[in-house]
Image (cartoon, grey):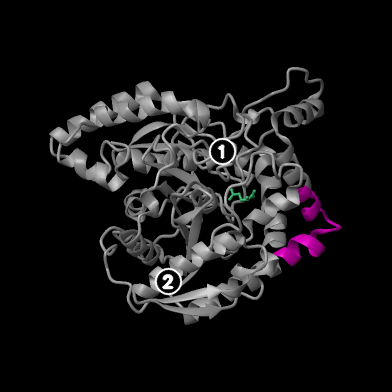
Amino acid sequence: MHTKTLAELSAALQAREFSSEALTGHYLERIGRLDPALNSFVTVTADEAMAAAAAADRRIAAGEAGPLTGIPIAHKDIFCTSGVRTSCGSRMLDNFVSPYDATVVARLKAAGVVMLGKTNMDEFAMGSSNETSFYGPVRNPWDTARVPGGSSGGSAAAVAARLAPGATGTDTGGSIRQPAALTGITGLKPTYGRVSRFGMIAFASSLDQAGTLTASAEDAALLLGAMAGFDDKDSTSVDREVPDYSLHLNDSIAGLRVGIPVEFFDEGLAGENRVRIEQALDVYRHLGCEIVEVSLPNLALSVPTYYVVAPAECSSNLSRFDGVRFGYRSEQSGDLFDMYSRSRGEGFGDEVKRRIMTGTYALSAGYYDAYYLKAQQARQLISADFKAAFEKVDVLMGPTTPTPAFEIGAKTADPITMYLNDIYTIGVNLAGLPGMSIPCGLVDGLPVGLQLMGPAFAESRLLQTAHAYQKETDWHRQLPAADFG
Ligand code: GLN
Protein backbone atom coordinates (compact mmCIF):
# COMPACT_ATOMS: atom_id res chain seq x y z
CA MET A 1 0.00 0.00 0.00
CA HIS A 2 2.74 2.45 0.95
CA THR A 3 4.20 2.53 -2.56
CA LYS A 4 1.05 4.32 -3.70
CA THR A 5 0.88 8.11 -3.67
CA LEU A 6 -1.65 9.87 -1.47
CA ALA A 7 -3.86 10.51 -4.52
CA GLU A 8 -3.73 6.81 -5.43
CA LEU A 9 -4.57 5.83 -1.86
CA SER A 10 -7.53 8.21 -1.98
CA ALA A 11 -8.82 6.50 -5.13
CA ALA A 12 -8.28 3.05 -3.59
CA LEU A 13 -10.21 4.00 -0.45
CA GLN A 14 -13.11 5.34 -2.52
CA ALA A 15 -13.08 2.12 -4.58
CA ARG A 16 -13.10 0.11 -1.31
CA GLU A 17 -9.95 -1.75 -2.29
CA PHE A 18 -9.03 -1.61 1.38
CA SER A 19 -10.29 0.20 4.45
CA SER A 20 -8.80 3.18 6.24
CA GLU A 21 -8.33 0.91 9.24
CA ALA A 22 -6.20 -1.46 7.18
CA LEU A 23 -4.27 1.42 5.67
CA THR A 24 -3.71 3.18 8.99
CA GLY A 25 -2.67 -0.10 10.62
CA HIS A 26 -0.18 -0.64 7.79
CA TYR A 27 1.51 2.74 8.35
CA LEU A 28 1.52 2.29 12.14
CA GLU A 29 3.24 -1.06 11.68
CA ARG A 30 5.87 0.57 9.44
CA ILE A 31 6.43 3.35 11.96
CA GLY A 32 6.87 0.85 14.79
CA ARG A 33 9.31 -1.27 12.80
CA LEU A 34 11.28 1.31 10.84
CA ASP A 35 11.22 4.59 12.75
CA PRO A 36 13.73 3.56 15.43
CA ALA A 37 16.39 3.93 12.68
CA LEU A 38 15.11 7.38 11.65
CA ASN A 39 13.70 9.12 14.75
CA SER A 40 11.21 10.95 12.57
CA PHE A 41 8.32 10.81 15.06
CA VAL A 42 8.24 12.42 18.49
CA THR A 43 4.78 11.10 19.31
CA VAL A 44 2.78 8.29 17.66
CA THR A 45 -0.96 8.46 18.31
CA ALA A 46 -1.82 4.87 17.42
CA ASP A 47 -5.08 4.48 19.37
CA GLU A 48 -6.49 7.83 18.24
CA ALA A 49 -5.46 7.01 14.67
CA MET A 50 -7.23 3.65 14.66
CA ALA A 51 -10.39 5.26 16.11
CA ALA A 52 -10.29 8.03 13.49
CA ALA A 53 -9.77 5.43 10.75
CA ALA A 54 -12.82 3.48 11.92
CA ALA A 55 -14.87 6.69 11.87
CA ALA A 56 -13.56 7.44 8.36
CA ASP A 57 -14.56 3.97 7.20
CA ARG A 58 -18.09 4.61 8.43
CA ARG A 59 -18.21 7.85 6.44
CA ILE A 60 -16.93 6.07 3.34
CA ALA A 61 -19.56 3.33 3.80
CA ALA A 62 -22.27 5.96 4.17
CA GLY A 63 -21.17 7.64 0.93
CA GLU A 64 -20.17 10.81 2.79
CA ALA A 65 -16.46 10.70 2.05
CA GLY A 66 -14.31 13.43 0.52
CA PRO A 67 -10.97 12.78 -1.19
CA LEU A 68 -9.02 12.93 2.09
CA THR A 69 -11.39 10.86 4.22
CA GLY A 70 -9.42 8.07 5.84
CA ILE A 71 -5.99 9.20 4.58
CA PRO A 72 -3.34 8.92 7.30
CA ILE A 73 -0.89 11.81 7.64
CA ALA A 74 1.61 13.14 10.17
CA HIS A 75 1.82 16.66 11.57
CA LYS A 76 5.01 18.54 12.28
CA ASP A 77 5.19 18.95 16.04
CA ILE A 78 4.90 22.73 15.67
CA PHE A 79 1.12 22.54 15.08
CA CYS A 80 -1.01 22.53 18.21
CA THR A 81 -3.09 19.38 18.55
CA SER A 82 -5.82 19.29 21.14
CA GLY A 83 -5.05 16.71 23.82
CA VAL A 84 -1.81 15.54 22.16
CA ARG A 85 1.57 16.96 23.22
CA THR A 86 3.04 19.72 21.03
CA SER A 87 6.75 19.96 21.82
CA CYS A 88 8.12 22.07 18.95
CA GLY A 89 11.26 19.94 19.29
CA SER A 90 12.10 21.67 22.57
CA ARG A 91 12.60 20.72 26.17
CA MET A 92 10.72 23.95 26.88
CA LEU A 93 7.48 22.37 25.59
CA ASP A 94 8.23 18.74 26.38
CA ASN A 95 5.19 18.71 28.69
CA PHE A 96 2.91 21.07 26.71
CA VAL A 97 -0.53 19.79 25.74
CA SER A 98 -2.53 22.34 23.81
CA PRO A 99 -6.24 22.75 24.62
CA TYR A 100 -7.06 23.42 20.94
CA ASP A 101 -6.14 22.44 17.39
CA ALA A 102 -4.20 24.68 15.01
CA THR A 103 -6.39 25.76 12.09
CA VAL A 104 -4.33 23.54 9.74
CA VAL A 105 -4.96 20.54 11.98
CA ALA A 106 -8.65 21.36 12.43
CA ARG A 107 -9.21 21.78 8.68
CA LEU A 108 -7.47 18.55 7.77
CA LYS A 109 -9.38 16.75 10.52
CA ALA A 110 -12.64 18.13 9.14
CA ALA A 111 -11.60 16.84 5.71
CA GLY A 112 -11.33 13.37 7.27
CA VAL A 113 -7.58 12.79 7.54
CA VAL A 114 -6.27 10.44 10.20
CA MET A 115 -3.38 11.75 12.32
CA LEU A 116 -0.64 9.13 12.78
CA GLY A 117 1.40 11.30 15.13
CA LYS A 118 3.67 14.31 15.47
CA THR A 119 6.99 14.56 13.69
CA ASN A 120 10.41 15.54 14.98
CA MET A 121 11.85 18.91 13.98
CA ASP A 122 14.62 21.36 14.72
CA GLU A 123 13.95 23.12 18.02
CA PHE A 124 11.39 25.87 17.38
CA ALA A 125 12.02 25.27 13.64
CA MET A 126 15.50 26.78 13.86
CA GLY A 127 17.86 24.73 11.77
CA SER A 128 18.71 23.34 8.35
CA SER A 129 19.59 19.77 9.29
CA ASN A 130 17.25 18.58 12.03
CA GLU A 131 20.11 18.28 14.48
CA THR A 132 18.85 20.85 17.03
CA SER A 133 15.85 18.86 18.32
CA PHE A 134 15.66 18.07 22.03
CA TYR A 135 14.65 14.57 20.90
CA GLY A 136 17.83 13.96 18.95
CA PRO A 137 18.65 14.18 15.25
CA VAL A 138 16.44 12.77 12.51
CA ARG A 139 18.20 10.49 10.03
CA ASN A 140 17.90 10.54 6.28
CA PRO A 141 16.31 7.31 4.98
CA TRP A 142 18.61 7.39 1.92
CA ASP A 143 21.65 7.19 4.18
CA THR A 144 21.11 7.12 7.93
CA ALA A 145 24.54 8.64 8.57
CA ARG A 146 23.26 11.82 6.90
CA VAL A 147 20.85 14.59 7.84
CA PRO A 148 17.37 14.78 6.27
CA GLY A 149 17.51 18.58 6.19
CA GLY A 150 15.52 20.83 8.46
CA SER A 151 13.57 22.07 10.12
CA SER A 152 10.67 19.85 8.93
CA GLY A 153 13.12 16.92 8.80
CA GLY A 154 10.87 14.50 10.67
CA SER A 155 7.99 15.08 8.27
CA ALA A 156 10.34 14.75 5.28
CA ALA A 157 12.05 11.56 6.50
CA ALA A 158 8.69 10.00 7.40
CA VAL A 159 7.26 10.65 3.93
CA ALA A 160 10.50 9.65 2.15
CA ALA A 161 10.48 6.32 4.02
CA ARG A 162 6.74 6.02 3.42
CA LEU A 163 5.92 5.90 7.12
CA ALA A 164 3.14 8.31 6.10
CA PRO A 165 1.86 9.22 2.62
CA GLY A 166 1.97 12.91 3.46
CA ALA A 167 2.81 15.34 6.24
CA THR A 168 2.50 18.97 7.20
CA GLY A 169 5.50 21.23 7.61
CA THR A 170 6.40 24.87 8.01
CA ASP A 171 8.81 26.98 6.01
CA THR A 172 10.32 30.17 7.45
CA GLY A 173 13.51 30.15 5.39
CA GLY A 174 13.35 26.84 3.53
CA SER A 175 12.21 24.31 6.11
CA ILE A 176 9.80 22.52 3.77
CA ARG A 177 11.69 22.77 0.47
CA GLN A 178 15.15 22.00 1.83
CA PRO A 179 14.31 18.72 3.64
CA ALA A 180 12.06 17.75 0.72
CA ALA A 181 15.08 18.14 -1.59
CA LEU A 182 17.43 16.18 0.65
CA THR A 183 15.01 13.27 1.08
CA GLY A 184 13.72 13.06 -2.50
CA ILE A 185 10.12 14.19 -1.99
CA THR A 186 7.83 17.04 -3.05
CA GLY A 187 7.61 20.05 -0.72
CA LEU A 188 5.31 23.04 -1.15
CA LYS A 189 5.64 26.35 0.68
CA PRO A 190 2.59 28.48 -0.16
CA THR A 191 2.36 32.26 -0.44
CA TYR A 192 2.56 34.08 2.90
CA GLY A 193 -1.02 34.40 4.16
CA ARG A 194 -2.43 31.54 2.07
CA VAL A 195 -2.58 29.14 5.04
CA SER A 196 -3.53 30.19 8.56
CA ARG A 197 -0.76 30.43 11.16
CA PHE A 198 -3.23 30.12 14.04
CA GLY A 199 -2.02 27.44 16.44
CA MET A 200 1.31 27.07 14.64
CA ILE A 201 3.99 27.93 17.19
CA ALA A 202 5.56 31.17 16.00
CA PHE A 203 9.23 31.42 15.05
CA ALA A 204 9.43 34.50 12.77
CA SER A 205 5.89 35.68 12.21
CA SER A 206 6.48 37.68 9.02
CA LEU A 207 8.08 34.65 7.33
CA ASP A 208 6.43 31.50 8.77
CA GLN A 209 4.11 29.62 6.46
CA ALA A 210 2.58 26.14 6.64
CA GLY A 211 2.71 23.75 3.72
CA THR A 212 2.96 20.15 2.63
CA LEU A 213 5.45 17.29 2.25
CA THR A 214 4.24 14.56 -0.07
CA ALA A 215 5.40 12.11 -2.72
CA SER A 216 3.96 14.13 -5.60
CA ALA A 217 2.58 17.48 -6.69
CA GLU A 218 -0.82 15.85 -7.20
CA ASP A 219 -0.78 14.89 -3.51
CA ALA A 220 0.27 18.39 -2.48
CA ALA A 221 -2.69 19.82 -4.42
CA LEU A 222 -5.09 17.64 -2.41
CA LEU A 223 -3.66 18.59 0.97
CA LEU A 224 -3.21 22.29 0.21
CA GLY A 225 -6.82 22.58 -0.92
CA ALA A 226 -7.98 21.41 2.51
CA MET A 227 -5.50 23.56 4.49
CA ALA A 228 -5.67 26.89 2.68
CA GLY A 229 -8.07 29.77 3.09
CA PHE A 230 -9.01 32.74 5.20
CA ASP A 231 -9.08 32.38 8.96
CA ASP A 232 -10.31 35.20 11.15
CA LYS A 233 -8.06 33.90 13.93
CA ASP A 234 -4.96 34.92 11.92
CA SER A 235 -4.83 38.60 11.03
CA THR A 236 -2.27 37.95 8.27
CA SER A 237 -4.32 35.28 6.55
CA VAL A 238 -5.58 36.50 3.20
CA ASP A 239 -9.26 36.59 2.32
CA ARG A 240 -9.06 35.16 -1.15
CA GLU A 241 -10.81 32.24 -2.76
CA VAL A 242 -9.05 28.88 -2.64
CA PRO A 243 -8.94 27.43 -6.15
CA ASP A 244 -9.43 23.72 -6.76
CA TYR A 245 -5.73 22.91 -7.02
CA SER A 246 -6.40 19.49 -8.57
CA LEU A 247 -8.56 20.84 -11.35
CA HIS A 248 -5.86 22.28 -13.63
CA LEU A 249 -3.02 19.92 -12.80
CA ASN A 250 -3.07 18.37 -16.25
CA ASP A 251 -3.22 21.60 -18.24
CA SER A 252 -0.41 21.91 -20.78
CA ILE A 253 2.59 24.00 -19.81
CA ALA A 254 3.71 24.58 -23.41
CA GLY A 255 4.75 28.20 -23.81
CA LEU A 256 5.44 28.67 -20.10
CA ARG A 257 8.26 31.17 -19.60
CA VAL A 258 10.78 29.74 -17.14
CA GLY A 259 13.33 32.14 -15.67
CA ILE A 260 16.69 30.85 -14.49
CA PRO A 261 18.24 33.27 -11.98
CA VAL A 262 21.98 33.37 -12.70
CA GLU A 263 22.65 33.89 -9.00
CA PHE A 264 21.39 30.36 -8.29
CA PHE A 265 24.24 28.90 -10.34
CA ASP A 266 27.12 30.38 -8.37
CA GLU A 267 30.34 28.67 -7.30
CA GLY A 268 28.56 27.28 -4.21
CA LEU A 269 26.48 24.88 -6.32
CA ALA A 270 28.02 21.40 -6.45
CA GLY A 271 28.86 20.31 -10.01
CA GLU A 272 26.80 17.12 -9.96
CA ASN A 273 23.79 19.01 -8.60
CA ARG A 274 24.13 21.52 -11.41
CA VAL A 275 24.04 18.67 -13.94
CA ARG A 276 20.81 17.28 -12.44
CA ILE A 277 19.17 20.72 -12.54
CA GLU A 278 20.21 21.21 -16.16
CA GLN A 279 18.75 17.81 -17.05
CA ALA A 280 15.48 18.82 -15.41
CA LEU A 281 15.46 22.04 -17.45
CA ASP A 282 15.87 19.92 -20.58
CA VAL A 283 12.67 18.08 -19.65
CA TYR A 284 10.90 21.43 -19.44
CA ARG A 285 12.33 22.46 -22.82
CA HIS A 286 10.98 19.22 -24.23
CA LEU A 287 7.56 20.11 -22.73
CA GLY A 288 7.57 23.33 -24.73
CA CYS A 289 8.72 25.79 -22.07
CA GLU A 290 10.85 28.75 -22.98
CA ILE A 291 13.91 28.91 -20.72
CA VAL A 292 15.39 32.37 -20.21
CA GLU A 293 18.12 33.71 -18.00
CA VAL A 294 17.11 36.32 -15.42
CA SER A 295 18.86 38.04 -12.55
CA LEU A 296 17.97 38.62 -8.90
CA PRO A 297 20.86 41.02 -8.23
CA ASN A 298 20.27 41.36 -4.48
CA LEU A 299 19.94 37.66 -3.76
CA ALA A 300 23.35 37.56 -2.08
CA LEU A 301 21.85 39.76 0.65
CA SER A 302 19.19 37.22 1.51
CA VAL A 303 21.13 35.11 4.04
CA PRO A 304 22.44 38.07 6.10
CA THR A 305 19.03 39.78 5.85
CA TYR A 306 17.15 36.71 7.00
CA TYR A 307 19.57 36.05 9.86
CA VAL A 308 18.75 39.50 11.26
CA VAL A 309 14.98 39.53 10.63
CA ALA A 310 14.24 35.95 11.77
CA PRO A 311 16.22 36.14 15.05
CA ALA A 312 14.72 39.59 15.78
CA GLU A 313 11.20 38.21 15.42
CA CYS A 314 12.03 35.03 17.34
CA SER A 315 13.51 36.98 20.25
CA SER A 316 10.12 38.60 20.64
CA ASN A 317 8.01 35.49 19.96
CA LEU A 318 9.95 33.30 22.35
CA SER A 319 9.71 35.75 25.25
CA ARG A 320 6.43 34.07 26.23
CA PHE A 321 8.34 30.95 27.33
CA ASP A 322 9.16 32.22 30.78
CA GLY A 323 8.53 29.21 33.02
CA VAL A 324 5.16 30.62 34.05
CA ARG A 325 2.75 30.55 31.15
CA PHE A 326 3.89 27.51 29.22
CA GLY A 327 6.00 24.46 29.57
CA TYR A 328 9.22 23.92 31.40
CA ARG A 329 10.03 25.47 34.79
CA SER A 330 13.39 24.97 36.45
CA GLU A 331 13.33 22.93 39.66
CA GLN A 332 15.77 25.23 41.39
CA SER A 333 14.13 28.58 41.02
CA GLY A 334 14.87 31.25 43.60
CA ASP A 335 13.25 34.63 43.06
CA LEU A 336 11.16 35.54 40.01
CA PHE A 337 14.08 36.69 37.88
CA ASP A 338 16.06 33.61 38.81
CA MET A 339 13.13 31.41 37.79
CA TYR A 340 12.87 33.10 34.39
CA SER A 341 16.54 32.84 33.69
CA ARG A 342 16.99 29.26 34.89
CA SER A 343 13.85 28.06 33.11
CA ARG A 344 14.94 29.64 29.83
CA GLY A 345 18.56 28.62 30.36
CA GLU A 346 17.62 24.98 30.87
CA GLY A 347 14.59 24.82 28.57
CA PHE A 348 16.17 26.18 25.37
CA GLY A 349 18.98 24.58 23.39
CA ASP A 350 22.09 26.34 22.06
CA GLU A 351 20.78 27.31 18.61
CA VAL A 352 17.62 28.86 20.05
CA LYS A 353 19.69 30.83 22.56
CA ARG A 354 22.03 32.00 19.79
CA ARG A 355 19.04 33.31 17.81
CA ILE A 356 17.44 35.05 20.81
CA MET A 357 20.73 36.76 21.64
CA THR A 358 21.38 37.83 18.04
CA GLY A 359 17.83 39.09 17.66
CA THR A 360 17.82 40.98 20.95
CA TYR A 361 21.10 42.62 19.98
CA ALA A 362 19.81 43.61 16.52
CA LEU A 363 16.71 45.18 18.07
CA SER A 364 18.48 47.01 20.87
CA ALA A 365 18.37 50.82 20.86
CA GLY A 366 21.96 51.40 19.74
CA TYR A 367 21.90 48.87 16.90
CA TYR A 368 18.34 48.94 15.60
CA ASP A 369 19.10 51.27 12.67
CA ALA A 370 22.35 49.58 11.77
CA TYR A 371 20.94 46.04 11.69
CA TYR A 372 17.19 45.67 11.86
CA LEU A 373 16.27 48.70 9.76
CA LYS A 374 19.00 47.88 7.23
CA ALA A 375 17.70 44.31 6.99
CA GLN A 376 14.17 45.57 6.34
CA GLN A 377 15.51 47.77 3.53
CA ALA A 378 17.43 44.87 2.01
CA ARG A 379 14.27 42.77 2.25
CA GLN A 380 12.48 45.34 0.10
CA LEU A 381 15.24 45.17 -2.52
CA ILE A 382 15.00 41.38 -2.66
CA SER A 383 11.20 41.54 -3.04
CA ALA A 384 11.59 44.09 -5.82
CA ASP A 385 14.02 41.78 -7.65
CA PHE A 386 11.46 38.96 -7.65
CA LYS A 387 8.74 41.35 -8.76
CA ALA A 388 10.84 42.54 -11.70
CA ALA A 389 11.68 38.95 -12.68
CA PHE A 390 8.00 37.95 -12.67
CA GLU A 391 7.26 40.70 -15.15
CA LYS A 392 9.34 38.73 -17.64
CA VAL A 393 8.67 35.10 -16.72
CA ASP A 394 5.90 32.90 -15.28
CA VAL A 395 8.00 30.79 -12.93
CA LEU A 396 11.59 30.72 -11.72
CA MET A 397 13.62 27.55 -11.43
CA GLY A 398 16.90 26.64 -9.82
CA PRO A 399 18.43 24.27 -7.27
CA THR A 400 16.82 23.97 -3.82
CA THR A 401 20.12 23.28 -2.05
CA PRO A 402 23.79 23.68 -2.99
CA THR A 403 24.66 20.03 -2.22
CA PRO A 404 22.97 16.72 -1.42
CA ALA A 405 22.48 15.68 2.24
CA PHE A 406 25.61 16.03 4.35
CA GLU A 407 26.74 13.82 7.23
CA ILE A 408 25.31 14.26 10.69
CA GLY A 409 27.68 16.48 12.65
CA ALA A 410 29.47 17.85 9.57
CA LYS A 411 28.30 21.44 10.05
CA THR A 412 27.18 21.71 13.66
CA ALA A 413 30.39 23.37 14.84
CA ASP A 414 30.04 26.30 12.46
CA PRO A 415 26.67 28.12 12.41
CA ILE A 416 27.61 30.29 9.41
CA THR A 417 28.33 27.26 7.22
CA MET A 418 25.00 25.84 8.35
CA TYR A 419 23.16 29.08 7.52
CA LEU A 420 24.63 29.06 4.00
CA ASN A 421 22.61 25.91 3.20
CA ASP A 422 19.61 28.22 2.97
CA ILE A 423 21.07 30.42 0.26
CA TYR A 424 18.59 29.35 -2.45
CA THR A 425 15.45 29.07 -0.32
CA ILE A 426 15.40 32.18 1.88
CA GLY A 427 14.72 34.77 -0.85
CA VAL A 428 11.23 33.39 -1.44
CA ASN A 429 10.34 33.74 2.25
CA LEU A 430 11.62 37.31 2.46
CA ALA A 431 9.43 38.15 -0.56
CA GLY A 432 6.42 36.16 0.77
CA LEU A 433 6.18 34.05 -2.40
CA PRO A 434 5.27 30.41 -3.04
CA GLY A 435 7.99 27.85 -3.71
CA MET A 436 8.26 24.12 -4.28
CA SER A 437 10.96 21.50 -4.38
CA ILE A 438 10.57 18.38 -6.49
CA PRO A 439 12.99 15.46 -6.78
CA CYS A 440 15.01 15.58 -10.03
CA GLY A 441 17.70 12.94 -9.70
CA LEU A 442 20.30 11.33 -7.52
CA VAL A 443 23.97 12.11 -6.90
CA ASP A 444 25.88 9.15 -5.43
CA GLY A 445 22.56 7.66 -4.36
CA LEU A 446 21.36 10.87 -2.66
CA PRO A 447 18.38 12.93 -3.86
CA VAL A 448 18.62 16.34 -5.52
CA GLY A 449 15.76 18.87 -5.59
CA LEU A 450 14.65 21.26 -8.31
CA GLN A 451 13.12 24.45 -6.93
CA LEU A 452 10.12 26.13 -8.55
CA MET A 453 9.16 29.66 -7.49
CA GLY A 454 6.17 31.73 -8.51
CA PRO A 455 4.48 35.08 -8.02
CA ALA A 456 2.13 35.51 -5.06
CA PHE A 457 -0.82 33.08 -5.09
CA ALA A 458 0.52 31.16 -8.10
CA GLU A 459 0.34 27.82 -6.24
CA SER A 460 -1.84 26.37 -9.00
CA ARG A 461 0.74 27.24 -11.63
CA LEU A 462 3.56 25.74 -9.58
CA LEU A 463 1.62 22.54 -8.94
CA GLN A 464 0.76 22.24 -12.62
CA THR A 465 4.41 22.84 -13.59
CA ALA A 466 5.62 20.25 -11.08
CA HIS A 467 2.98 17.73 -12.12
CA ALA A 468 3.95 18.07 -15.80
CA TYR A 469 7.52 17.07 -14.83
CA GLN A 470 6.31 14.19 -12.67
CA LYS A 471 4.30 12.79 -15.58
CA GLU A 472 7.49 12.74 -17.69
CA THR A 473 9.86 11.34 -15.05
CA ASP A 474 9.76 8.93 -12.15
CA TRP A 475 12.19 10.47 -9.65
CA HIS A 476 9.28 11.08 -7.27
CA ARG A 477 8.58 7.33 -7.26
CA GLN A 478 12.08 6.29 -6.29
CA LEU A 479 12.35 4.99 -2.74
CA PRO A 480 15.30 4.50 -0.41
CA ALA A 481 16.36 0.93 0.37
CA ALA A 482 13.68 -0.82 2.42
CA ASP A 483 15.89 -1.26 5.49
CA PHE A 484 17.54 2.19 5.17
CA GLY A 485 20.93 0.42 5.01
N1 GLN B 1 17.24 27.07 8.14
C1 GLN B 1 16.52 28.26 8.44
C2 GLN B 1 16.69 28.63 9.89
O1 GLN B 1 17.35 27.92 10.58
C3 GLN B 1 15.07 28.10 8.06
C4 GLN B 1 14.28 27.39 9.08
C5 GLN B 1 12.82 27.34 8.73
O2 GLN B 1 12.43 27.54 7.58
N2 GLN B 1 12.01 27.13 9.74
O3 GLN B 1 16.21 29.63 10.32
Q: Which residues are magenta?
A: 358-375
Q: Where is residue 115, by image quadrant?
A: top left
Quarter of the image with the N terminus in it: top left
158 in magenta? no
374 in magenta? yes
Image x and y of residue 417, in percent: 72, 52
Indicate yes or no: mark 1 CB to ligand 1 under 8 Å: no
Image x and y of residue 113, in percent: 32, 38
In this figure, which residue is indicated by the disc labeled 2?
282
Q: Where is residue 388, by image quadrant?
A: bottom right
Between 180 and 75, which is closer to the camera in this rendering? 180
What amino acid is labelled 1 in the image? Answer: Met
In this figure, which residue is indicated by the disc labeled 1?
121
Looking at the image, residue 455 sits to the left or right of residue 418; the answer is left
Looking at the image, residue 281 sits to the left or right of residue 16; the answer is right
Q: Where is residue 272, by image quadrant?
A: bottom right
Q: Please, which residue is most extreme toward the top here?
A: 331
Looking at the image, residue 397 sits to the left or right of residue 408; the answer is left
What amino acid is labelled 2 in the image? Answer: Asp
From the image, give the main secondary structure of the stretch colored magenta.
Answer: helix
Mark 2, secondary structure of its residue: helix
Between 222 and 357, which is closer to the camera in this rendering? 222
In the image, residue 119 sits, relative to residue 398, either above or below, namely above
